[in-house]
Amino acid sequence: MREVDLRSDTVTHPTPEMRQAMADAEVGDDVFSDDPTLNKLEAMAAERLGKEAAVFVASGTMGNLVSVLTHAQRGDEIIVGDKCHIFRNEAGGASALGGVAYNILPNDEHGMLDPDEVAAAIKPPNVHFTRTAMIGIENTHNACGGATLTPEDTKAIADVAHRHEVPLHVDGARIFNASVALETPVAELVKDADSVSFCLSKGLSCPIGSIVVGSSEFIDGARKWRKMVGGGMRQVGIVAAAGIVALETMVERLAEDHSNARKLAQGLSQIPGISIEPDKLYTNLVFFEIKDGDPAVIMQEINRRGIKGGMPTRRWRFVTHYGITSEDVDNTLEVMETVMRDFSKN
Ligand code: TLP
């Protein structure tokens, strides 16, 4: 039985070309800045995102953490959305490790913040207040259905931030999905941001790694924080080699994941007991509701039939990626239909 793993695009395996490049990679010691493969990847990433410099980090979480720690000092605050990954899914790292407070504003259903609310939330200098040291947005926005932010959306927040001399960070874990979906170069999407983190190990299929980009000064600071949190790696060219292949060969194909996601959403919308809004589908994240039956049991049933995914809650997310073919989508829909039919009979 072929397993179909829809839990996340983090489950992607490296491509054969990546494995070869990893085996052949020339390496050095990156803490001495002399790993040629990593240096090449960082230069490529900075250029691709239109920023001065880049630093490789172990994960998206580490990328966001070192970005926050570089922008903010102990006792400062960051303004982020209530549904963003930095606030909800990074174990409170900014506050636990950095002494940085979260100032939370509501994300709208597209993952956007209201620029007026951001302006009102930025703290004026006053002995009673935390200093607002960073504003963070997320593109694509995971919890908001993989929604994309346009360059204009980002500019609207950046303008407010910069008017108050506050830097803007973009959690661009899936920024290449946004770029492909909007048919807009990634550098254009982030041109008004001061720092961006993006993941190599999601839709781009690398085994490990994320990258933070920004000004040279910012990246020098981020390198120091990366070292402090234990992220200074040594012969990291082995994994960087996969990142180079990813940037060269794995970006355009994300369109396939988006089209598989549309097919999946369309099919799910036909299944009784499932509720989905296909017009709220933007990229490779398919969110829907299990209305009938016990979601925990349904999850067990589909898992038994080779479909990995689901949650013991009503809101589910299926993610399409390099490891999911159009036939896998057919198979998933068949299993979902069978299982849901069984449940509505019971
Ligand atoms: N997201 C994961 C889980 O943590 C939820 C997933 O399966 O989607 N920013 C965003 C927007 C993310 O979605 C993620 C991972 C991260 C940052 C963190 O990346 P990693 O997992 O590499 O630390």
Image: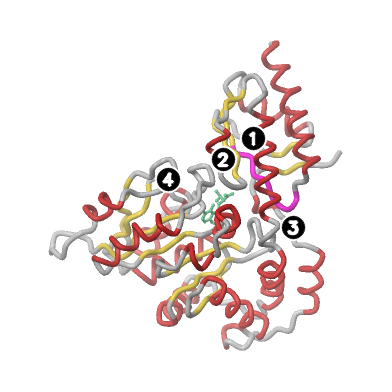
Type of the residue with mark 3: His
The answer to whether residue 320 is magenta is: yes
Q: Residue furthest left?
A: 127
Q: Quadrant of residue 194?
A: bottom left
CA gap between label 3 and label 4 equals 28 Å
**Foreground tag (2 vs 4):** 2
Within-10-Å neighbours for mark 1: few <14, some 14–19, many 20+: many
Question: Secondary structure under badge 4?
Answer: loop
CA gap between label 2 and label 4 equals 17 Å
- Residue 82 position (above or below residue 342): below
Type of the residue with mark 1: Ala
- Residue 234 position (above or below residue 113): below
**Earlier along the polypeptide chain: callout 2 or callout 3?**
3
Q: Which mark is residue 13?
A: 3
CA gap between label 2 and label 3 equals 25 Å
Picture residue at 52% right of the left edge, 42% below the top = 145
Task: Kindly identify which residue carries mark 1.
Answer: 265
Ligand 1 is within 8 Å of the C-beta of the residue at disc 4:
no
